[in-house]
Structures are given as structure tokens and as C-alpha cells.
Amino acid sequence: MLDPTGRVVMLSGASRGIGLAIARRLHAQGYSLSLGVRNPEAVAAFAAFDPKRTLVQRFDAERGETAAQWVDATVARFGRIDALINNAGILRPLDLRSGDESVLDEMWAVNVKAPFRLIRLALPHLEKGGHGRIINVASTDGKRYRDTVSVAYAMTKHAVMALTHAAKFAGWEKGVRVTALCPGAVDTDLVASVPGVTPSANRIAPETIAETVAFLLRLPNTASVAELVLNTRLESWI
């Protein structure tokens, strides 16, 4: 298993929900963290983090230039990047019969183009250490389609699955391992706002996702997990 000491992790969407749970777990394990958030000045959640091991940097998934600025700032501060966790994402209702197509554009920008951009920028740095890791937080809605789910959300999460496998092939020979983490309903504000969602008692705790991420980051190159589904419901094929 890989030792977290000295390893640098970039994490998007770090200020709340799944991202904050991941940040807290990885900080406790000794990782150095580069945390991408929309408004670094307004985030008090990281006040207890070791400032020597923590960089809080502006990252707006809809503004491409902030991706390059974040990667550059991470390398300038720590000199390396060992892992990238693409966690930032949004969910908006849209179906084939109603809704504004601009919703799809917004979700595509945040859920697909932003991780694509970050992977492209971070990959050369991830390859240098020989044990780079990328985790894309996808969804069970990227593994199948349910007619109660926003078609735009499902489309973007299916695209993240394709992106994951593309990144796996791109970095494999230089030790980069890539995982699509596909949880069902997680107990966050994002999920709570969705009509007809899984009852809160049956949702996954963000801390469970964080523990899973911590486990994936420590796996050796010889134990690659391309897709990992954490389901909250009984389904026949996922």
C-alpha cells in the first residue's frame, strides 16, 4: 500500500458535502492537500488544517482559466501532484420533453469539461512520480438510466465513465491509475433537493465515500480499480 506521507492531492469541490468529507479524511491521514473551491476567502471549514500541508485555491469549474491557475499554484507550492480527485459536480432537472437546453450546457461544462481539463493539465505531473492517481466521482446514474433522473445528469455521468477509461489508457504506462467512483444517493444537500430521491436513512454518508477514496489512493499499481459502484439499492446488474 502507498504511504500518504509527502503525497500531494488535488481535490475539486472541497468546501462541502463529499468533498469536505474527503478533505478531512485525507488531511487526517497526512496527505498534503490542494483544495479547489469557488471562493477561498469564504471557506472556514479548513481552519483546523495544517497550513504547511494545505493550499486553498480558487477553482470555478465553469471558467477554464482557473483550472490552469490551480494546477500551476499547486506545483508552485508543493513541487508535485500525486493525485487528482474530480469531485465538483452539479445536478439540474431536465428531461427530453421539457426544460431549457442551457441546463445541459451548464452541466456539461461542470461535470464533464472541467474534469477533462484538469486531467489534461495534471497528467504530466501525475506521470512523473510513477504512482499517480485519478479518481472521478461519477454516479450509479453513469452506469444505467432511470426515468426519474435528469437526462442531462445521466448523460454527463456516462461521459465521465468514458473519460475515466480514456485517462486510464493515457497514463497507464507511466504508473497512473484511474478510478470512476460510482455512488448511489449520498446524504448531501445536492441530493436532498432532488424530488423522489432515496430516503435519508438509506443514503450513503459522505464519510463512507471519503473512506473509500482513501482506500483507493493507497492501492499499489498492481491493483487497479477502473470502476467502483457503491449502491444504496438492490439492482440486478450494478
Image (cartoon, rainbow, N blue to C red):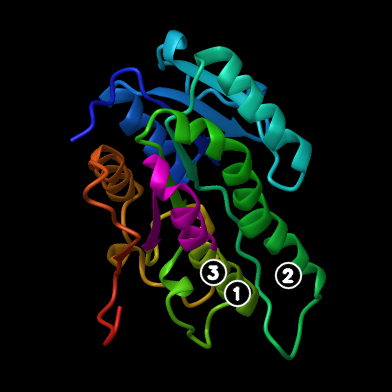
Q: Which mark is residue 104?
A: 2
Q: Is residue 50 left or right of residue 106?
A: left
- The answer to whether mark 2 and mark 3 are in CB contact below 8 A is no
Please name the amino acid that badge 3 sits on.
Val
Q: Which of marks 2 and 3 is nearer the N terminus?
A: 2
Residue 116: horizontal and vertical position, in percent?
A: 62, 52
Residue 205, relative to residue 82: is it above or below?
Answer: below
Residue at 52% in and 67% down = 162
Q: Is residue 62 left or right of residue 128?
A: right
Q: What residue type is labelled 1?
A: Met
Residue 194: x, y in percent?
54, 69
Q: Distance between the residues labelled 1 and 2?
A: 9 Å
Q: Residue at x 36, y 70 (%)?
A: 199
Which is nearer the eye, 105 or 220? 220
Is the Cβ of the residue at disc 1 closer than 8 Å to that at disc 2? yes
Q: Which residue is denoted by mark 3 in the rendering?
A: 194
N-term mark: 1 or 2: 2
- The image shows residue 103, relative to residue 11, as above or below, that is below
Q: What residue sits right under mark 1 in the picture?
A: 155
The residues colored magenta run 163-182
Q: Alpha carbon of mark 3 to alpha carbon of mark 1: how far?
A: 17 Å
Horizontal relation, residue 14 to residue 215: left or right: right
- Residue 156 location in percent, x, y? 60, 68
Label 3 secondary element:
loop
Of badges 2 and 3, nearer the viewer stands 2
Is 177 a magenta residue?
A: yes
